[in-house]
Image (cartoon, rainbow, N blue to C red):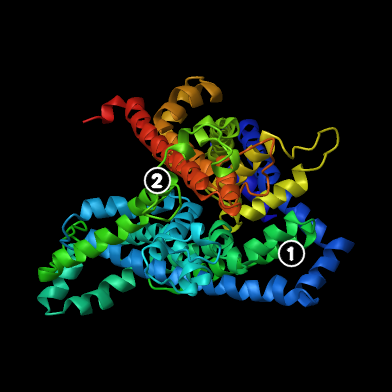
């Protein structure tokens, strides 16, 4: 009855019933085909005879210790360590940039937001170039070993480097979330405390910290969920010493012909992340709410750091540079070295432009002379562009339906379902798409090994980001504009083309670029969907690294980073061109 009333109320908000009903129905169909049905297919597999046997094997069989419980403990340890460290590091940087007179804070703020753009596997590969020991051979050892600096085994491989690589990648999430909360702390709050004689420590503990506590909880939960679902960093830094997480065990099970066991582990990953995010939501709701904008309009002042200004600036700048600029430079240097990780090795351009030579790299040509790499670049760009366009099309259907319903139970349900993929690891989405779209569906053929399944998986994984861009863009457009056009007889397609899309274009471009970049650099999502007939840059880089061709892996990774940066620059230019009145 509640759902019926919501539908009736949502469809009677001053819009043609048939148009809103069709749009709402289309939105539910899009979400069902992209997310709900593939996930339900995994659930069906788990209650089959083979699935129930796999559940027993994973939870209580002879392989349970190595298949589930030990990887689960590793996953939890990494997740909690990453969450705590990201909140601490991101919180300190956010406080320094937003609330103090730190020198160079604008540059530090820009660099602090960039690490999330750098793929996790790029950070992991850069770590091996510097810290790898010689257990995989002298040629595979890192720079410190070649410089004569002993590297302890726990720092070269295993849980510690996995956690550090993930922290370097994910702390940007915490920084952005906490900084957005800190900018709301008005100067009148801290000024009153200063007048009362409160110390800086007292102000932080009694005013600033309580205000940002909800953001701290949310940031920690997101970092935990991202860490427990990560595949690439544990695969690169953990597998050489048989350090497994749930993600690497699930990948291994599916790759070795035991998909049901992989589905069980993926289900555990999804439930773990979902429960932790739900717990964080409960803690946020129980927390206190604070009014942070007073009579002065929330005017912000900056806390004086005194003699600590420059030492803290150097420390902050070193931190953000070490997680953005340094990994790129390390990978670039390694890609032109005859021995990866050896700073004394001869420089060469073979791994970029060299011709095939049996005496070098087992006869493999440089990546720019390798037809497979050129094809992989074109396939990756094509899949990224197709995914961006398809994701925006799907997001327009969902976002416009949410806007047309104008609140209520039905709109809230649509929005929650659209954001469901945030709870689902990329590896799980890839496995779900294989399970459902990898087999014929009635007259439709199997999509496995085709670009279509990559696009479907990419749209499913990036739907929350695309929908958010559409919803945010539409929220800035006054409903009276569309209502006025509708009164004059304009059709919905005409209103969309003449009013909604032009005004929303900058945010739509930003959403498109976010989807494109995520698809180009995401290894976890596509690792199970890769086939030799459909090469992708991220998977090829991972294969090169796994097979010991480090320089090729690093060169391909630099190309991925370059594509990501160029996409962001192009988006900035297009956004300004789309609305010339916003130019200076």
On the image, the x and y values in percent for residue 389 come to 55, 32
Query: In the rendering, which numbered label is found on residue 264?
Result: 1
Q: Look at 80% across and 61% down and name the residue there.
A: 46
Query: Badge 1, how many Cα within 10 Å: few under 14, some, many 20+?
Result: many
Question: Is residue 106 in view?
Answer: yes
Q: Which is nearer the eye, 264 or 524?
A: 524
Rendered view: 453 above or below 294: above
Does dot 2 land on a helix, a strand or a loop? helix
**Alpha-carbon span between mark 1 and mark 2:** 39 Å
Could you tell which of marks 1 and 2 lies nearer the N-terminus? Answer: 1
At 67% across and 43% down in the image, what residue appears? 530
Q: Which mark is residue 169?
A: none
Q: Quadrant of residue 245?
A: bottom right
- Residue 249: % across, % down: 68, 64
Using residue 26 as the reference point, say whether residue 369 is left or right of it.
left
Read off the residue under disc 2: 332
Q: Name the quarter where the N terminus is drawn.
A: bottom right
Secondary element at image label 1? helix
């Amino acid at each position: 009855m509640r759902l019926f009333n919501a539908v009736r109320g949502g469809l009677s908000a001053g819009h043609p019933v048939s148009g809103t009903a069709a749009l709402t129905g289309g939105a539910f169909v899009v979400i069902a085909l992209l997310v709900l049905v593939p996930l339900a297919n995994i659930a069906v597999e788990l209650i089959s005879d083979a699935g129930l046997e796999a559940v027993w094997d994973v939870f209580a069989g002879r392989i349970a210790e190595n298949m589930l419980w030990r990887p689960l403990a590793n996953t939890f340890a990494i997740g909690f360590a990453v969450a705590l460290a990201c909140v601490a590091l991101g919180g300190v940087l956010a406080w320094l940039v937003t609330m103090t007179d730190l020198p160079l804070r604008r540059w530090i703020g820009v660099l602090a937001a960039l690490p999330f753009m750098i793929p996790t596997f790029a950070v992991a590969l850069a770590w091996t170039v510097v810290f790898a020991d010689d257990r995989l051979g002298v040629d595979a050892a890192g720079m410190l070993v070649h410089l004569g600096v002993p590297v302890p085994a726990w720092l070269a491989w295993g849980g510690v480097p996995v956690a550090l690589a993930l922290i370097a990648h994910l702390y940007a999430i915490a920084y952005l979330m906490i900084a957005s909360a800190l900018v709301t702390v008005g100067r009148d709050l801290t000024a009153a405390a200063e007048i009362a004689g409160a110390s800086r420590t007292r102000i932080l503990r009694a005013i600033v910290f309580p205000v940002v506590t909800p953001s701290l909880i949310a940031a920690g939960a997101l970092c935990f969920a991202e860490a427990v679902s990560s595949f690439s960093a544990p695969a690169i830094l953990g597998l050489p010493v048989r350090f497994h997480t749930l993600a690497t065990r699930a990948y291994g099970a599916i790759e070795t012909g035991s998909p049901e066991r992989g589905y069980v582990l993926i289900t555990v990953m999804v439930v773990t992340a979902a429960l932790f995010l739900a717990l964080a939501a409960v803690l946020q709701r129980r927390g206190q709410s604070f009014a942070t904008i007073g009579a002065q309009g929330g005017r912000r002042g900056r806390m004086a750091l005194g003699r600590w200004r420059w030492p803290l600036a150097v420390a902050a700048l070193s931190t953000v540079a070490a997680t953005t600029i340094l990994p790129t430079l390390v990978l670039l240097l390694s890609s032109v070295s005859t021995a990866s990780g050896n700073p004394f090795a001869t420089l060469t351009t073979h791994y970029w432009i060299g011709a095939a030579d049996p005496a070098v790299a087992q006869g493999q040509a440089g990546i720019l002379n390798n037809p497979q790499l050129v094809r992989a670049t074109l396939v990756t760009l094509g899949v990224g562009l197709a995914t961006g366009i398809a994701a925006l099309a799907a997001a327009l259907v969902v976002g416009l339906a949410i806007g047309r319903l104008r609140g209520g139970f039905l709109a809230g349900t649509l929005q929650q379902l659209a954001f469901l993929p945030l709870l689902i690891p990329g590896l799980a989405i890839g496995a779900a798409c294989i399970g459902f779209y990898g087999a014929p569906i009635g007259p439709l053929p199997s999509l496995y090994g085709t670009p279509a399944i990559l696009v479907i998986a990419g749209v499913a994984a990036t739907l929350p980001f695309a929908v958010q861009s559409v919803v945010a863009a539409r929220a800035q457009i006054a409903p009276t504009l569309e209502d006025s056009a509708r009164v004059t007889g304009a059709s919905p397609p005409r209103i969309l083309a003449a009013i909604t899309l032009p005004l929303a274009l900058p945010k739509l471009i930003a959403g498109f670029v976010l989807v494109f970049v995520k698809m180009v650099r995401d290894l976890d999502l596509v690792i199970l969907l890769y086939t030799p007939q459909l090469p992708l840059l991220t998977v090829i880089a991972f294969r090169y690294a796994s097979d010991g061709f480090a320089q090729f892996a690093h060169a391909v990774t630099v190309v991925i980073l370059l594509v990501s940066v160029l996409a962001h620059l192009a988006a900035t230019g297009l956004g300004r061109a789309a609305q010339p009145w916003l130019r200076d």
